[in-house]
Structure formats: C-alpha cells, structure tokens
Image: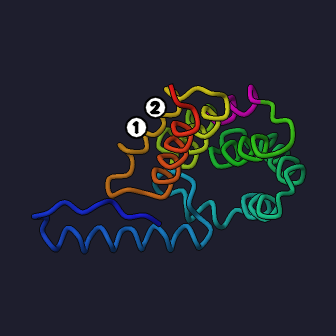
Amino acid sequence: MMMKKQVPNRLNWQNLLTACLLCASSAAFAAGGGGGGAGGEEKASADPVIAAAKAAIEKKDWAAAQAGLKQALSGNSNNADYHNLYAYSLRKGPNPDMAAVFSHYADALRIDPKHRGAHEYSGEAYLMAGDLPKAKEHLAALDRLCTFGCEEYTDLKKAVAQYEASHPR
C-alpha cells in the first residue's frame, strides 16, 4: 500500500493518526471487508453470498460469481455490495456487457453513494470504455471520501495514470 507523501512541518500526532487509520483499514480489508462505504465492511464479511462471490472471483470463476450474485440480487435488489461485485464479475469475465456493468455500478452507488469499491470499479470500467473524464469523476469522489487516503483511491489513481501514459493526447 502506498502512503501519501508527507508534507514538511506536519505535527507528529497527525502522522501517527494517519498510520493507525491506514493500518486499521488494511486489517479490515484483509479480514474480508474492503468494498462498501461506512459501516458496511463488517456486514459484508459475514454475508455468505459475498464470501462465495469473493471465493469464486479469487479463482477467476466469473460464471459462478455471476450466478450466485444474480440469484442473490433477485431476492435482495437493494444491496450495494451485491451490485458492485456482480458488475465486477461481469466486467472481468469474458465478453463483458458494459451496459449491464455500468447499470449495476450505478445501482450500487444509488444505494450507497459512499461505496468506495463501486467508485473504484466504476472508474476502472470507464477507463475500459475509454472515458477518462468519467473515471476522473470517480477518482475525485474517492478523494473526498478517503480523508486519509484509502486503497480504492490509490488503485484508481494508479489505473488512471497508466491509462494516461498509454493513451497520450
């Protein structure tokens, strides 16, 4: 994980607080959270649908992830984490239906406008579609949401930089 460059003359307690918050967020992500907005991490890590989807995604079994999440969405269409992971599995799988991808990311953000994972993945989807300005909108949203920085912001910022380097104007 990259830490933000430190600015001279910052108080030591601020540096300590930043380091503690980054360690805590890394521990929550490693424990199975790391996608939703405020408070959603504990609930998502205990959800068997999320656990099964993440296991399938880890194996790159996109069809299994999609099937489980699609079924879960049919019974609970108001779950931002389900929409986010479903869109992710569609996007990463073979022949992604980008209209469906964008629709499910939009649903995730409609349900939870602070869903960091949905902002990161939406930004990556916009890069796939060649829409750098929309990707940067999601990067800006993450910048506002992640007061002390977060993995989602760092990852999308890196993806935007790679896109810009490979698509010179």
Between 151 and 127, which is closer to the camera in this rendering?
Answer: 127
Which residue corresponds to the image point at 64% horizontal and 36% vertical from the top-left?
A: 125
Q: What secondary structure is found at the residue carrying circle 2? A: helix
Residue 142 falls left or right of residue 67: left
Which residue corresponds to the image point at 61% horizontal and 32% vertical from the top-left?
A: 126
**Residue 49 circle label:** none
Instruction: Specify the quadrant of the image occupied by residue 17.
Output: bottom left
Most common secondary structure along the magenta stretch:
helix
Which residue corresponds to the image point at 74% horizontal and 25% vertical from the top-left?
A: 99
Which residue corresponds to the image point at 38% horizontal and 51% vertical from the top-left?
A: 146
Q: Which residue is mark 2?
A: 137
Query: Which percent across, then down, holds residue 160?
Result: 51, 41
Q: Which residues are magenta?
A: 98-105
Query: Which percent across, then down, holds residue 3?
Result: 37, 64
Q: Tell me the kind of residue under disc 2.
A: Glu
Between 164 and 3, which is closer to the camera in this rendering?
Answer: 164
Q: What secondary structure is found at the residue carrying circle 1? A: helix
Query: Which percent across, then down, holds residue 165?
Result: 52, 39
Instruction: Specify the quadrant of the image occupied by residue 148.
Output: bottom left
Task: Establish if 45 lies above or below 75.
Answer: below
Q: Which residue is mark 1?
A: 140
Query: Which percent across, then down, holds residue 168?
Result: 52, 30
Residue 111 magenta-highlighted: no
Tell me the distance, in whole angstroms, between the alpha carbons under discs 2 and 1: 5 Å
Is disc 2 surrounded by few (<14), some (14 to 19) or many (20+) residues within 10 Å?
some
Is disc 1 surrounded by few (<14), some (14 to 19) or many (20+) residues within 10 Å?
some
